[in-house]
Image (cartoon, coloured by chain):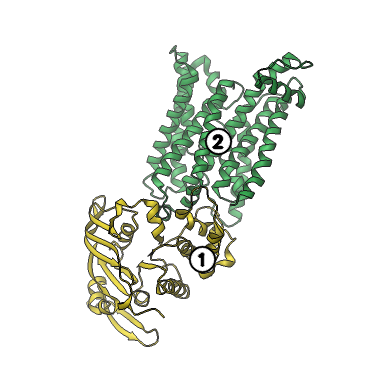
Amino acid sequence: MAPPLSERNTGQLWSLREVHFSYGDTPVLRDIGLELRSGRCTGILGPNGSGKTTLLDLLAGLQAPQSGTIEFQGRPMAAWPKKHLARLLALVPQDFMVRFGFSVREVVEMGLHPHLHRFATPSEADRALIDQALAVTGIATLADRPVTRLSGGEKQRVAVARALAQRPTVLLLDEATSNLDIHHSLELLHLIRDRFERQDMQVVAVMHDLNLAAFFCDHLIFLKEGRVICQGPTDEVLTPATINAVYGVEAEVTANAFTQCRQVSFRLPASH
Amino acid sequence: MNRRAAAVWMLPLAAVLVFGVALSATLGYLDVSIPDVFAILIAKLRGLDMPPGIDPVAATVVADVRMPRILAAVLVGGLLGVSGAVFQAILLNPLADSYTLGISTGAAFGASLVIVLQIFGLALPPGVTIPVFAFGGGAGTLAVVLFLAAGDRRLSSTSLILAGVIVAAILSAAIGFLKFLADEQVGLIIFWLMGSLAGASWANILLLAPTALLGTLVAVYYSRDLNIMATGDRAATSLGVNTVRLRLVLLAVSTLMTALAVSVSGIIGFVGLIVPHMLRHLIGPDNRLLIPLSFFTGGLLLLVADTLTRAVLPVEVPIGVLTALLGGPFFCFLFKRRQRNGATAF
């Protein structure tokens, strides 16, 4: 059993100060100041176009802000060599598309890329790691199938298996379950949560579904129109007031005995 | 991929290629036996006198006429195969190659310009200017095509191929005008536009061989990064692949490879498209294997085609015409089969 949250090691992961980001003339993130710590599963929530994915890109080092500073483990993002960063951070994109018919195993093996010398062949230990990543994501039987022939849910599990093979310190999820049915969503999130509980890996997840976020995340950050509206432990910030302020819907939040999580129900405000 | 699989494919192909080169050197107007071909080449390479019993005419024909042309066929085919494989991998598009992207036409325009300038009495050394102008034309065309297609951030098949077709159409008209200017000497341009290895010399080999070697090595060096590119830019960047640098380096290298091939042989279509495509069906999409095999297969294909037109067919058909006549229908077949398999065409 994982130790309670308060006893876990809560080291510094990212520290953002006065971060601004825009695509051309369109501002996407404004004046973001955040501390992201380890030892808790962090969720980034907000309506469409609120800048969630862009924030994740900044954390992953895929984009650089126009102004402000982002530090990861006390070192500015720009000072990290990309290859080194790839050994610490793995990203599971929202829509994992592979253009040529690579086999599932070949795609998962790509996760070794930042750890392997250019012309090195994977070692026994590497191959065992791949087998394990295939097994825990439940795609071992698909290992030799071309990834282009898989269903959306299977592809998404390939993306997670590849990220696991990357042995990251932090796993970044970008709405990784938004194309999955509820069974596959829960399965995938349980799998990742389990890794997190065993303190193998930290997690920052952009999420769409508030109820899945309530089950999955210990800490939530709410974005709206590129600003942080509120953040804090899930139990404190997942309230009708926050949801109304962020999404503009009326909400009821209850402690659900069946799921042992907070559950949210919504309706449009009466004036609609 | 493991190294054994690479050896299993690479060694036999290399052996077939060497045998093909030797066999092709025996074919032609003058019959020369395979042992004699080897004897002549070994004597030439070691700078020795021809061994007794070998016809000196045969020695000249094999060493100075057939060999440069045969090697040029292998190298041009290899260059087109590798650059096709790289274009397809980097643009995530199995329909991309130097021909469909208009790069070949751009290179042909550059080279035709040199020919016309020469007709008008501009004294330029063609050995240098044709490759330089061909590269300039090819690189310029690539830049314009990418610019036109760049509005579509995913660089999808449709927008890239459409941009390639549009630019190639404009360039074809420009080449038409150059032909008109060339007036009576238009044959020079036309023969060259249809593709031919008839004029290949040892000087060409000295240009093509290092380009083929270096270009293929660069492509193989980046082949694992290219594999990862197939899973999308964002995912590739998060795995530590510098996608911007990779694109720039490999587009420049492939354009150089195409342009030099075009500057020697003229436009030879379909090799760059068909070879990687066919290989992907046989061995899968892993670029670590696909790129070197594209060199060998492209070389072999063009060697066979050139030997056909040089020594087997009663009249010499321009090789670009031959590859298009053979490759075109084959490509139509692949295209229809993909549709039948339920995949959207490309």
For this rendering, which residue is in front, A140 or B177?
Answer: A140
Label 2: few (<14), some or many (≥20) within 10 Å? Answer: many
Q: Colour of chain B?
A: green
Kind of residue sitting beneath label 1: Ala
Q: Quadrant of the N terminus of chain A?
A: bottom left
Residue B27 visible here: no
Q: Which mark is residue B249?
A: none
What chain is colored yellow? Answer: A
Where in the figure is residue A211, as x and y percent of width and height? 35, 77
Residue at (43, 61) in percent of width and height: A95
Whether pointer 1 and pointer 2 mark residues with C-beta atoms closer than 8 Å, the reply is: no
Asked which secondary structure carries label 1, the reply is: helix
Q: Which residue is mark 1?
A: A133
Q: Is residue A256 above or below residue A194?
A: below
Q: Which residue is mark 2?
A: B80
Left or right side of A216 for B175:
right
For this rendering, which residue is in front, B183 or B284?
Answer: B284
Where in the figure is residue B212, as x and y percent of width and height? 54, 33
Question: Mark 1 vs mark 2: same chain?
Answer: no
Left or right side of B237 for B127:
right
Residue at (65, 35) in percent of width and height: B300
- Residue at the right extreme, as displayed: B53
Label 1: few (<14), some or many (≥20) within 10 Å? Answer: many
